[in-house]
Amino acid sequence: MGKTLAEKIWEDHVVRRADGEPDLLYIDLHLIHEVTSPQAFDGLRLNNRKIRRPDLTIATEDHNTPTQNIDQPIADPVSKLQVDTLRKNCAEFGVRIHSLGDIEQGIVHVVGPQLGLTQPGMTIVCGDSHTSTHGAFGALAFGIGTSEVEHVMATQTLPLARPKTMAINVEGKLKPGVTSKDIILAIIAKIGTGGGQGYVLEYRGSAIRELSMEGRMTICNMSIEAGARAGLIAPDATTFNYIKGKPHAPKGADWDAAIAYWSTLVTDSDAKFDMEINLDANELAPFVTWGTNPGQGLPLNSNVPNPAEIADAEARGAAERALIYMDLTAGTPLKSIKIDTVFLGSCTNGRIEDLRAAAEVIKNKKIASSLRMLVVPGSARVRLQAESEGLDKVFIDAGAEWRNAGCSMCLGMNPDQLKPGERSASTSNRNFEGRQGKGGRTHLVSPLVAAATALRGTLSSPADL
Amino acid sequence: MEKFILHTGSAIPLRRSNVDTDQIIPAVYLKRVTRSGFEDGLFSAWRSDPEFVLNKPEYAKASILVAGVDFGTGSSREHAVWALQNYGFKAVISSRFADIFRGNSLKGGLLTVILPQEQVEALWLAIESDPTTQVTVDLESRTVTYNDATCSFELDDYTRWRLMEGLDDIGLTLRHVDVVTSFEEKRAQFKPKTLPALAE
């Protein structure tokens, strides 16, 4: 019997297999940031260990970093200590780091692909659950905890139990105004936040093949919101064209050897998945979340659901609690919900295509006076690219704030936070209670919906303008 | 790592599903560079509510958390495990855990026990009607016992052995460092390296 893509990559990385033990997998790339690494570096020091492969390791500062006045010292002393600690650790252990102010600085999952370090068939890990983003290149990429960060540092391997595989087939053609963000929000609403637990997801079908690399990254990024540690898309010409010419892309004979290998990275026609899910792209509409987990989403034209109509007791209780937290009443049209803050950014939707799509909607218009809009590019390079295209002016002229790169309001570890009771339309990935600031309320949306919402002041799609 | 063989203590019912790691410990608490002191951030948003179960004096001494389905979803932050351990929890029982959280907990010696939802319900009822109920989590026999009830749970032999011996994964892997070296010798040359740094 043939193998799935995930099984092929897995098998190619097994360093050691023994009965009754997890497989020991080789890790091709380890991405590091300031939040989940200090205790791992400490562990190395305590045990007098080194980083085995600094040449397969790279660090960036993203979670804590401010998006304003980045030429000044970080004002929050605790954030500053954490960032300084990363700098010291990288210097001590010989790790390449891109610090705030560096042209390659940015969100770790934006930086890897733009440097060409993310390539098909690799195993990629990071102490961050959105590492699943890199699966868009046909790499097996997943988030790990700090103990595992230390393990990879010391050994360049990880002991792991083999996951099951799930195919998510998305066939058909997206309607105008419907994006990859809407695909993934619809998938999570369908299978739930626990639906992918124990699986690697492989996104397949004509609608997936049609997507750009950046659209594919948005989908794989949120695999973890469906409970799956990793999501994959088989590499194809779109992938190869995206990688070609990037700083760390293979060159010359290496490029040919790489293409030959990458071209084998598809699920065999006779391979069997442990589970299959089908989604019709033709039926999809702009999606928005109404609750406090990413599975609580509906098409934008819907009303806030009535928990009493939910059959499953557990889901009903969760919906009741969510409506209280979100201060929403069952039956309210989602489009009538007033928004205080629009956040455009994050490792989900902070890439150049996301900024272009939103700018196209906003161009020559003004955002509603009742709200603020933060535009936070995913990396310093994305920011520079956007500025070279004049997108910064589009946003600033519309009344939005143009910021420096970082995770920013996606998780509110830096000063960019919602105030208690404030409501956002956010292109990020999590609408958990307090995620964007204590007491803040989050509606997850696509960049197009974010832009239209900024103009109208209530949840909207470009079709409503 | 401390060995885990058997633990007996009182238990606290957390009747919520989908408790994500942002609820277990919000991001603002993750700025520390140590492994200790995270107990003050545990469930921080909910602890301002006097009715929240952790604030009830009858559960003050509990060392086992009995949670709803899909505990530990979301962010990979191991700080969630540290916060639970720093607070004094030795084990968490639920009918389903998120993958990364479960991996982190078993690496760090916080035992996560999976029981069917009806057994979780029965345990909730027992500890709600008598908060002093003593619950024993026995890794040797892979059982949870309280009052007259005995519930078996599954955990693979390897992880069980590692926890009972208190072994650190890194030390175990380093025993096979020669296999890692020979794997590295066969890696494809086209695979990228971060050093030296190349620019556009």
Image: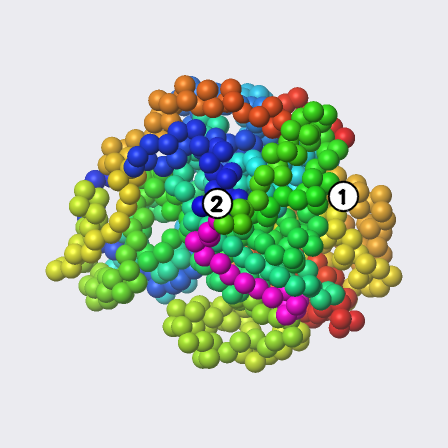
Q: Nearer the viewer, residue B186 or A434?
A: B186
**Quick check: A232 above or below B116?**
above
Q: Nearer the viewer, mark 2 or mark 1?
A: 2
Residue B36 in the image: state x and y as whole percent: 40, 38
- Give the mark, 2 or 1, whose residue is nearer the N terminus: 2
- Residue A2 bears which disc, if any? 2
Chain ID, mark 2: A
Residue A348 in the image: state x and y as whole percent: 63, 51
Quadrant of res B49: bottom left
Q: Quadrant of the C terminus of chain B?
A: top right
Q: Amino acid at mark 2?
A: Gly
Q: Quadrant of the N terminus of chain B?
A: top left
Q: Say if the magenta span includes residue A216.
A: no
* Residue on which the image places disc 1: A383
Helix, strand or loop at label 1? It is helix
Q: Which residues are magenta?
A: A271-287
Q: Say if the magenta span includes residue A274.
A: yes
Badge 2 crowding class, 10 Å Cα cut-off, few under 14, some 14 to 19, many 20 or more, is: few
Q: Residue at x 35, y 64 (%)?
A: B15
